[in-house]
Image: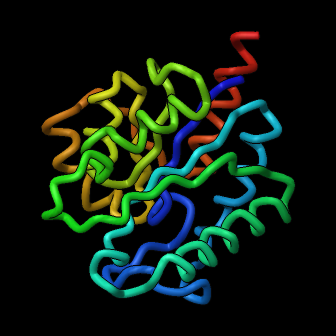
Amino acid sequence: MKLLILDRDGVINQDSDAYIKSPEEWQPIPGSLQAIARLSRAGFLVFVATNQSGLARGLFDIETLNAIHRKMSDAVQAVGGHINAVLFCPHGPNDNCNCRKPMPGLYHEIAHRSQLTLQDVPIVGDSLRDIEAAISVKAHPILVRSGKGEITLPTLKKIYPNVPVFKDLISVSEALINKTSSQS
């Protein structure tokens, strides 16, 4: 089995500077659900790692976050895919926790749960903190231009010029599946 880690907001669903605070506000990026389904069928274990400081800020409660994640998982299942687990950091930016990206805590927990190494695992995000967390665990960071990716791109190219950049999760899925099939 191959491990794949995705950020949520901006990679799978539309992002919002006002936070995604309800299942109704959670809207998939066109093609992202199908991309996850293709990756699942190609043998990838798909994990989601997401900062959710809206919990610490009191913008939504844990039941609402669970409902959002249920909606996401159900939507992926409806098109033939599977998300193995969704891990989230509930803390605010000043809480100094180890699970808020760019810290690697969520990724270490995924490695523990999957019993797989993070070495060269593709980790897809739309922000610098996603990329930095991936680099810190020796994974293979990938930036998508969706979400905040376009804004992140100029800084990324100055600091980490070799990180691959894709339009969206669909194009990432095509590249990963092609790479996997050519190695078989």
The residue under the point 59% across, 24% down is: 115
Residue 37: where, in percent of width, then height?
A: 77, 50
Q: Is residue 119 left or right of residue 102?
A: right
Q: How many marks?
A: 0
Which of the image's four quarters has the N terminus? top right
Question: Which corner quadrant of the image does residue 69 belong to?
Answer: bottom right
Position of residue 62 relative to residue 21, above or below, is above
Foreground residue among 81 and 54: 54
Q: Is residue 183 left or right of residue 7?
A: right
The residue under the point 51% across, 30% down is: 111
The residue under the point 47% across, 51% down is: 49
Question: Which corner quadrant of the image does residue 175 belong to?
Answer: top right
Furthest-top residue in this view = 184
Foreground residue among 69 and 12: 69
Position of residue 56 relative to residue 147, above or below, is below
Residue 46: where, in percent of width, then height?
A: 64, 42
Q: Which colour scheme is used?
A: rainbow
Residue 102: where, in percent of width, then height?
A: 25, 46
Question: Which corner quadrant of the image does residue 43 belong to?
Answer: top right
The residue under the point 57% across, 54% down is: 86
Which of the image's four quarters has the C terminus? top right
Q: In this view, does 90 lie to the left or right of 25?
A: left
